[in-house]
Image: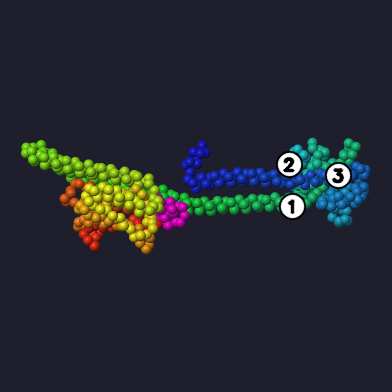
């Protein structure tokens, strides 16, 4: 039930709800503690009173002191050091007459006041603590209040007679603690003994604890509110903005999305926003790329299909064998062209999938280029007499961040393109150099026809092919694949005609490591 309830709450509400539960539990335990702290402190002082009372009764019994005013006064004078830490010690006979009071020992003119305000009676023993609060209107000295005599009278007639009683008295800024007990001799009650002590320290300790708890609660509450505000303002709201951003992208909403303010942050949310935005742009780019590629592929296939259809219709009616052979060659050519387009397209999709799984690392491209050059020399030197040579500028290592087999693919595609435009017995040169700013450059130079295009960038577009003499033999995807792989390595590729002689130049520039 609770888990289902929490599932439907936002993070902020969950945070506030859980904190309120802990706050309530802590507050409950604190309340219980504060309710028990005063009785515990009173019980501790009461235990001291009971010990003093028992010692006093033992001394009275041992000294055989009679419970009359004269003997009790002498006893108080002789043993007053026993009560020096107490505010007042009072003796009553069994008829509740005052027979001794430490307040009168120093000839203090004050008489014993029988005025006591509202009294909280409390029975304290080793096992139980009982509280009784009473208010009585008894006319003593024309004042309506409860006297100590009334407390003693209640004590004498109660079922707890014989057990020490402790009660508290609050008057103005005073908090007094009084313990009374009857005095037995030979199985007979001969009087009562009352000890009164100023217990303002108990009140101060309780007030101090209450103040501390209240201040702590207020401070914790303020901290929770501030943290909730910070959590909501700097974490939850940006996350909501990111969620809204993803929903708008998912639903292809026309509503403008902007997370540039989040991308400016230097914390984890800023990194997440940048990563999410880059991922979204990359996905959109790939989707657009796939859509455009599919459209271009359909367009490219439509031409040979139309040619196939026309040739097949004419072939059906053609009677001349030479004409039929010509039409069959056209059909064969168009089928090969469609097959080449589909094969190259399939390979391109496979390459894109593989690229998503491969990791870029630091590599030295020189041995990779040498390996590709050796492989091509073994094929084309014997077949067409084309010599492919490798040159460098004498530097030690040519380090880049890249994918080894993709670098091989780039060099192989460029060499294949250069050889296809070269006549037999010509040279193709692969040059590797490092500039002063540590950027690595690769140049592939051939001795072919060069570029007829004014804008050489168009040769990297999909399905572009300027080969009138070899129409249909190339899909026009080779250089486009090279361009995509070069972009993957954060490098640039540039096509131009050679300055020193006739031929084409392809130059790739890799960023420095």
Residue 501 image offset from top left, x and y in percent: 22, 61
Task: Answer yes or no: is residue 87 visible.
Answer: yes
Q: Looking at the image, is mark 3 or mark 2 nearer the viewer?
A: 3
Residue reaching furthest front?
382
Residue closer to the observer: 370 or 357: 370
Q: Residues within 10 Å of mark 3 (few under 14, many from 20)?
A: few
Element type at mark 2: strand
| Residue identified by numbered label 3 | 55
* Position of residue 408 in the picture relative to residue 98 (left or right): left
Residue closer to the observer: 132 or 414: 414
Residue 420 image offset from top left, x and y in percent: 22, 51
N-terminal-most mark, 2 or 1: 2
Q: CA–CA distance between discs 1 and 3?
A: 25 Å
For the image, the number of numbered tags is 3
Element type at mark 3: helix
| Residue identified by numbered label 1 | 201
Q: CA–CA distance between discs 3 and 2?
A: 26 Å
N-terminal-most mark, 1 or 3: 3
Q: CA–CA distance between discs 2 and 1?
A: 21 Å
Q: Which residues are magenta?
A: 255-278
Q: Looking at the image, is mark 2 or mark 1 nearer the viewer?
A: 1
Q: Which mark is residue 131?
A: 2
């Amino acid at each position: 039930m609770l888990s289902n309830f929490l599932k439907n709450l936002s993070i902020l509400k969950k945070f506030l709800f859980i904190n309120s539960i802990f706050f309530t539990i802590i507050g409950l335990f604190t309340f219980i503690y504060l309710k028990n702290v005063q009785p515990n402190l009173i019980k501790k002082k009461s235990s001291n009173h009971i010990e003093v009372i028992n010692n006093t009764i033992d001394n009275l019994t041992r000294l055989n002191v009679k419970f009359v005013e004269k003997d009790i006064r002498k006893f108080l004078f002789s043993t007053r050091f026993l009560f020096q830490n107490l505010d007042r010690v009072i003796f009553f006979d069994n008829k509740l007459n005052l027979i001794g009071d430490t307040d009168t020992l120093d000839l203090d003119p004050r008489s014993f006041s029988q005025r006591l305000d509202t009294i909280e009676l409390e029975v304290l023993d080793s096992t139980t603590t009982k509280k009784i609060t009473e208010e009585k209107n008894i006319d003593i000295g024309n004042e309506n209040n409860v006297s100590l005599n009334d407390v003693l009278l209640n004590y004498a007639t109660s079922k707890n007679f014989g057990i020490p009683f402790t009660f508290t008295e609050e008057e103005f800024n005073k908090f007094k603690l009084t313990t009374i007990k009857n005095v037995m001799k030979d199985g007979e009650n001969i009087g009562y003994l009352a000890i009164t002590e100023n217990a303002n320290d108990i009140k101060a300790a309780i007030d101090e604890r209450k103040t501390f708890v209240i201040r702590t609660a207020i401070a914790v509450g303020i901290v929770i509110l501030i943290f909730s505000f910070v959590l909501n303002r700097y974490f939850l709201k940006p996350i909501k903005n990111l969620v809204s951003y993803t929903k708008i992208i998912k639903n292809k909403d026309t509503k403008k999305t902007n997370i540039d303010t989040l991308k400016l942050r230097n914390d984890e949310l800023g990194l997440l926003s940048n990563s999410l935005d880059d991922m979204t742009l990359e996905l959109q780019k790939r989707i657009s790329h796939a859509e455009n590629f599919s459209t271009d592929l359909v367009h490219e296939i439509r031409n040979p299909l139309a040619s196939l259809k026309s040739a097949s219709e004419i072939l059906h009616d053609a009677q001349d064998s030479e004409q039929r052979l010509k039409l069959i060659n056209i059909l064969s050519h168009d089928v090969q062209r469609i097959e080449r387009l589909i094969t190259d397209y399939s390979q391109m999709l496979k390459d894109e999938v593989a690229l998503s799984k491969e990791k870029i690392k630091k590599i030295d491209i020189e041995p990779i280029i040498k390996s590709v050059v050796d492989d091509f020399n073994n094929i084309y030197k014997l077949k067409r007499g084309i010599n492919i040579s490798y040159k460098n500028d004498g530097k030690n290592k040519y380090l880049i961040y890249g994918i080894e087999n993709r670098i091989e693919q780039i060099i192989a595609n460029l060499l294949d393109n250069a050889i296809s435009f070269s006549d037999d017995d010509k040279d193709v040169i692969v040059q590797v150099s490092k500039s002063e700013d540590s950027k690595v450059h690769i140049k592939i130079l051939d001795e072919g026809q060069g570029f007829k295009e004014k804008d050489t960038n168009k040769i990297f577009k999909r399905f572009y092919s300027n080969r009138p003499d070899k129409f249909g033999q190339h899909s026009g995807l080779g250089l486009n694949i090279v361009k995509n792989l070069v972009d993957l390595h954060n490098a640039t590729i540039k096509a131009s005609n050679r300055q020193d002689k006739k031929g084409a130049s392809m130059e790739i520039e890799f960023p420095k490591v």
